[in-house]
Structure formats: structure tokens, C-alpha cells
Amino acid sequence: MFKKLVKELAEELLDDWNDEKTKKKFQERILDPIVCYLIDKMYPYFLVSSTVVFILVFLMVMILFLLLRK
């Protein structure tokens, strides 16, 4: 009895999921806000890490230049 109910519920959910309108609602109401929130929270870390990498690469090039100059 319970297995039949779960199976029917799963089938109904899968049928609804295949509908393009349902996918669009899910994307607009759940996925897009989550992605925007994560990007807003991760932006400072991305900026700092990019700056650190840029500085490291610059310093490596300068050290290489100084070593080859001698």
C-alpha cells in the first residue's frame, strides 16, 4: 500500500518535472536566487584570490627577469 503510494507520487513528480513550464518556475524561483546569493557572497573572496595570484605572477616574472639579467 505505502510502496504503491510512493511510486505514484514519484511518477507524478517526474511527469510534472518534464513539463517546460515547471522547469522554468523551478529555475526562476529556486536556482536563480541561490546562484545570485552565492555569487554575491563569493565575490570578495574571488577578488582577493585573483589579486593575490596576479601579484604572485608579477613577482615571479620580476624575479626571473632579475636572475636572467645577471
Image (cartoon, grey):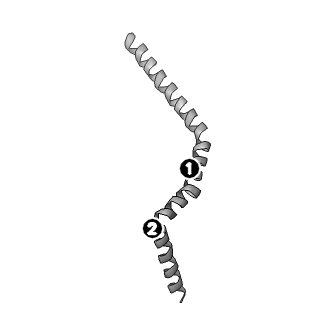
Q: Nearer the viewer, mark 2 or mark 1?
A: 2
The answer to which quarter of the image holds residue 28 is bottom right
Q: Is residue 68 above or below residue 47?
A: above
Measuring 52% from the left and 81% from the top, which residue is drawn there? 6
Dot label at residue 35: 1
* Residue in the foreground of this view, choosing between 67 and 26: 26
Q: Would you call the spot at circle 1 few (<14 residues within 10 Å), some (14-19), or many (20 or more)?
A: few
Residue 5 x, y percent position in the rendering: 53, 84
Quick one: label 2 or label 1, which is nearer the N terminus?
2
Percent position (x, y) of residue 23? 49, 61
Image point (50%, 30%), residue name: 53
Q: In this view, does 38 lie above or below 11?
A: above
Q: Is mark 2 on a helix, strand or loop?
A: loop
The quarter of the picture where the C terminus appears is top left
In the rendered image, the residue lying farthest to the top is 70
Q: Label 2 vs label 1: CA separation? A: 22 Å
Q: Disc 2 marks which residue?
A: 18
Amino acid residing under circle 2: Asn
- Taking the spot 59% from the left edge, 52% from the top edge, the residue there is 33
Q: Where is residue 9 in the image (x, y as percent from the top left)?
A: 52, 78
Q: Where is residue 39 in the image (x, y as percent from the top left)?
A: 57, 44
In the picture provided, is 68 more to the left or to the right than 2? left
